[in-house]
Image (spheres, rainbow, N blue to C red):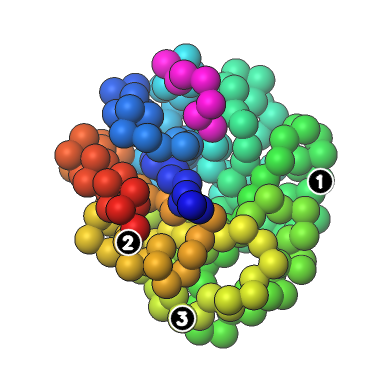
């Protein structure tokens, strides 16, 4: 049976990271974007990574960051993969990852006129496409879903579905989209940057039952 992977993003506390892992999350996300309320310091990130057991991926989320900035963080924090969540071009992503020697996936903020098939071609080196809701106000973490009907059924890239997911709608999202993974942040929070153990458990149970 196909299993949908789960990433809990916007982790800022060790206890939240461990809660996500104990609930069965496959990955946690650390945000390195100063404008985000979920941005972590180097010290926070180091403490979280040090607490991680084997076989859980640590994802570093960056928005329009240069290779030098990413390399500086990588020299202090172990990351397994990079999530580019800004306006990066395929060339930006590939050049940065060639320098840091890490794989990446690309976040796409979906609008009605977004050509996801073209994005899959353009970002051919990406391990996956993360599909999130579009808003002019922020690059992500808005807690808003988008129209999943905009996702082509024949998209030739693994899909990480994000945007407004929570325990109430994630099963339906999985059934409709059949993504490789789902990504949640606000849907399992008490306040921005602080997760709820109960909401994480409910989310993971809904994914499992889907």
The answer to whether residue 156 is above or below residue 62 is below
For the residue labelled by badge 2, is the local secondary structure a helix, a strand or a loop? helix
Q: Which stretch did the figure color magenta?
A: 51-57
Q: Can you give x and y, in whole percent of width and height, for residue 100 in the image?
A: 75, 32
In contact (CB < 8 Å): disc 2 and disc 1: no
In the rendered image, the quadrant that contains the C terminus is bottom left
201 relative to 185 in the view: left or right: left
The tag earlier along the polypeptide, 2 or 1, is 1
Q: Main secondary structure of the magenta part?
A: loop
Residue 142 can be seen in this image: no
Q: Can you give x and y, in whole percent of width and height, for residue 204 in the image?
A: 31, 45
For the residue labelled by badge 3, is the local secondary structure a helix, a strand or a loop? helix
Please give the residue where the numbered disc 3 appears in the rendered image: 149
Q: CA distance from mark 1 to mark 3?
A: 33 Å
Q: Nearer the viewer, mark 3 or mark 2?
A: 2
- The image quarter in which residue 190 lies: top left
**Residue 95, labelled with which disc?**
1
Q: Nearer the viewer, mark 1 or mark 3?
A: 3
Q: Can you give x and y, in whole percent of width and height, for residue 164 in the image?
A: 33, 62
The tag earlier along the polypeptide, 3 or 2, is 3
Give me the residue at 29% from left, 23% from top. 15
Please give the residue where the numbered disc 2 appears in the rendered image: 171
For the residue labelled by badge 1, is the local secondary structure a helix, a strand or a loop? helix
Q: CA distance from mark 2 to mark 1?
A: 37 Å
Give me the residue at 22% from left, 46% from top. 202
């Amino acid at each position: 049976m196909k299993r949908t992977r789960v990433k809990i993003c916007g982790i800022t506390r060790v206890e939240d990271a461990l809660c996500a892992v104990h609930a069965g999350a496959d990955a946690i996300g650390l945000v390195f974007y100063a404008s985000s309320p979920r941005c972590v310091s180097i010290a926070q990130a180091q403490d979280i990574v040090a607490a991680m057991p084997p076989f859980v991926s640590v994802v570093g989320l960056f928005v329009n960051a240069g290779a030098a900035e990413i390399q500086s963080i990588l020299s202090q924090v172990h990351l397994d993969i990079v999530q580019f969540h800004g306006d990066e071009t395929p060339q930006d992503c590939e050049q940065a990852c060639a320098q840091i020697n890490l794989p990446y996936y690309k976040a796409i903020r979906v609008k009605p006129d977004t050509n996801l098939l073209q994005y899959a071609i353009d970002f051919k080196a990406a391990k996956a496409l993360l599909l999130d809701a579009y808003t002019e106000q922020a690059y992500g973490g808005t807690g808003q879903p988008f129209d999943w009907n905009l996702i082509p059924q024949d998209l030739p890239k693994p899909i990480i579905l994000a945007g407004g997911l929570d325990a109430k709608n994630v099963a339906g999202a999985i059934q409709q989209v059949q993504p490789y993974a789902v990504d949640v942040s606000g849907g399992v929070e008490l306040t921005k940057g602080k997760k709820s153990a109960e909401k994480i458990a409910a989310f993971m149970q809904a994914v499992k039952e889907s």
